[in-house]
Structures are given as structure tokens and as C-alpha cells.
């Protein structure tokens, strides 16, 4: 019976880890009145990350997706200016799960069942990519991505590429006049 309770506890931990806080979160927003069909060139304004090794990785990931969409990177005179900011921060999550068969009535009254609370520390990374109209200096598009950070740089590079791919999946957006 004790082995069964340990087994159930392990399953609960794995399920909790897979359902909370460990999925990539990517969102985009844009000015609905802007016709992105007028934009064909871009240039980088700045990239700022907490780790300077990632600045070129961010540029490479965004460059790949924009160039796949037919946009051209130029050194000056672009239609769009791009800024990107990446940061990491430590997060803490409390996970509660019950050992055994859960709550019920016992000879002493209502009981909640044996409970374990676990504190999980993890690091999250966030990337924000902004596009500005080079003429008006107005923000026209923003993409954000957040995900847990691995201890392995190779995994993080794959996560970055996947996040940027998701950001630009439906890019360029259609104008909604």
C-alpha cells in the first residue's frame, strides 16, 4: 500500500509539472490600421539581453523568420526598426498534492487526507520584439514569448527558435480597416 501511495504521489508531481508553468507562451499584437504590405525592409535598432551571448541569437532567429517572409535586412533607410529585449528571472511555484486516496470521513471527523506541499524554483525567460514604423516612429507590431529556461544552452536555443517561429507564424498581419 505504501508503494502505491508513493506511485500516486509521483504521478501527481509529473502531472502538475506538465500542466503548470512549463509551456511556451507566445503572443503578438499589432496596429490594426497599418498596412504591412507597404513594409519590405527592416533594420535593427537595438537588442538587449541579460546575457550578451543571446543578442546575436535573437537577431539570427528574427532575421531568419523575416527573411523567410520576403523581408530584407538593410543597414539604413529601412521601413521598419526593430528592438528586442530579453530577460530572465527566478520564479517560485507552490505545488500541493495529496498522498493516498484523498479526503473523507474518519472516526475523528472530516479529514483532508495526507497532503504534501512542494516549493519548486525555476527560471523563466521572456523575449519582447517590437517593430516601429521608421518614418513615424510609431509601434506597429509586438511579439512576446515566455518559457522556462533550461540549464542546457542548446535546449534554450531551440526554445528561442521555436518561440520566434510562433511569433512570426501569421506575420505579416492583414490590415483591419
Image (spheres, rainbow, N blue to C red):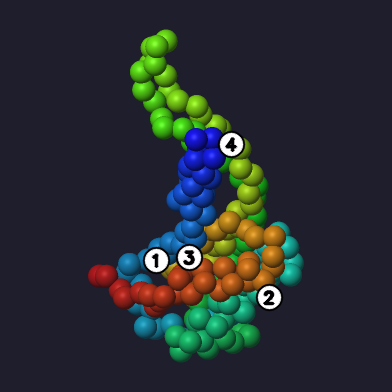
Does residue 9 appear in the picture of this structure? no
Disc on the earlier residue, 4 or 1: 1
Up-down: is 97 above or below 156?
A: above
| Circle 4 SS class | strand
* Residue closest to the eye, 111 or 175: 111
Residue 107, x across and y down, in percent: 40, 11
Q: Which residue is mark 1?
A: 30
Q: Which mark is residue 116?
A: none
**Residue at x 69%, y 68% (from the top left corner):** 153
C-alpha span from label 3 to label 2 = 18 Å
Q: How many marks?
A: 4
| Circle 2 SS class | helix
Q: Which residue is mark 4?
A: 118
In-image side of 49 versus 19 (left or right): right
Q: Quadrant of residue 59?
A: bottom right
| Circle 1 SS class | strand
Of all residues, the one furthest to the right in this rendering is: 52
* Residue closest to the eye, 110 or 100: 100
Badge 4: how crowded within 10 Å, few (<14), some, or many (20+)? few
Residue 93, x across and y down, in percent: 56, 41
Amino acid at each position: 500500500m505504501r508503494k502505491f501511495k508513493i506511485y500516486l504521489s509521483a504521478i501527481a508531481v509529473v502531472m502538475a509539472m506538465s500542466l503548470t508553468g512549463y509551456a511556451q507562451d507566445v503572443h503578438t499584437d499589432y496596429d490594426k490600421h497599418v498596412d504591412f504590405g507597404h513594409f519590405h525592409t527592416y533594420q535593427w535598432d537595438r537588442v538587449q539581453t541579460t546575457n550578451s551571448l543571446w543578442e546575436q541569437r535573437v537577431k539570427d532567429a528574427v532575421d531568419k523568420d523575416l527573411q523567410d517572409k520576403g523581408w530584407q535586412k538593410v543597414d539604413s533607410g529601412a521601413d521598419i526598426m526593430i528592438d528586442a529585449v530579453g530577460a530572465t528571472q527566478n520564479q517560485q511555484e507552490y505545488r500541493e498534492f495529496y498522498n493516498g486516496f484523498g479526503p473523507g470521513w474518519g472516526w475523528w471527523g472530516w479529514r483532508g487526507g495526507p497532503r504534501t506541499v512542494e516549493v519548486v524554483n525555476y527560471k523563466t525567460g521572456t523575449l519582447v520584439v517590437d517593430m516601429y514604423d521608421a518614418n513615424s516612429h510609431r509601434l506597429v507590431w509586438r511579439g512576446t514569448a515566455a518559457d522556462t529556461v533550461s540549464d542546457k544552452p542548446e535546449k534554450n536555443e531551440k526554445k528561442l527558435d521555436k518561440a520566434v517561429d510562433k511569433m512570426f507564424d501569421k506575420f505579416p498581419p492583414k490590415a483591419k480597416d
